[in-house]
Amino acid sequence: MRAFLLFLALAVTVMAEPVKVTITGIRNDKGQVAALVYKAEKGFPDQRGDAYKVVSLPAKKGSVTLTMKGLEPGKYAIAVIHDENSDGAMETNFIGLPKEGVGVTGGMGYSKPKFHKSVIEVKAGQEVSIFLKYF
């Protein structure tokens, strides 16, 4: 019984370690930078309501680091949006390209990112870096 309790205490300690997401390439101090964590394809990469977890903080030109507490180890795709006007949505132009910065795990190309290409294995205490792209 004692060994089981020790194992349980160690497991909870490992799972409690936060995951840090460093976002680079932020072009200005306007608005918010939000990281959206998805367990499934629905809503990826920009629908906050479909995200498993959302963490945001004020934008800072250059880079910021978000700390995600309570994120259990597992497979996730993480999208980051620089919401420059703080309206809670990603602004797009007439052909659908983002007018605000966006980045995902796995990197951005020139088309909408695919969930399956952005999935990474997240471990407790892990550090993830995401570069923002502005079109």
Image: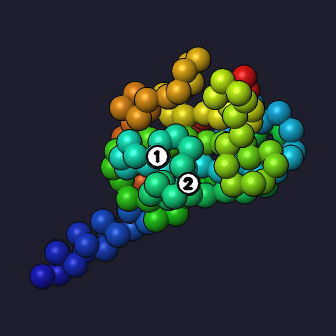
What's the CA distance linking mark 2 and mark 1?
8 Å
Please, which residue is most extreme toward the front here?
94
The structure residue drawn at horizontal position 61% and vertical position 58%, both measured from the top left corner, is 55
> Tag 1: Cα neighbours inside 10 Å, few (<14), some, or many (≥20)?
few
Q: Nearer the viewer, residue 8 or 94?
A: 94
Q: What residue does disc 1 label?
A: 43
Color theme of the render: rainbow
The structure residue drawn at horizontal position 17% and vertical position 81%, both measured from the top left corner, is 2
Residue 84 percent location from the top left of the image: 80, 45
The structure residue drawn at horizontal position 37% and vertical position 49%, both measured from the top left corner, is 39
Residue 46: quarter of image: top right
Give, as a three-letter code, the residue at label 1: Gly
Badge 2 vs badge 1, beta-carbon distance below 8 Å: yes
Q: Nearer the viewer, residue 50 or 74?
A: 50
The label on residue 29 is: none
Q: Is residue 14 above or below residue 2?
A: above
> Tag 2: Cα neighbours inside 10 Å, few (<14), some, or many (≥20)?
some
Q: Quadrant of the C terminus?
A: top right
Q: Is label 2 in a helix, a strand or a loop?
A: helix
Residue 109 visible in the displayed image: yes
Residue 36 percent location from the top left of the image: 55, 50
Q: Is residue 119 above or below residue 37?
A: above
The label on residue 48 is: 2
The structure residue drawn at horizontal position 22% and vertical position 78%, both measured from the top left corner, is 5
Residue 134: quarter of image: top right
Give, as a three-letter code, the residue at label 2: Arg
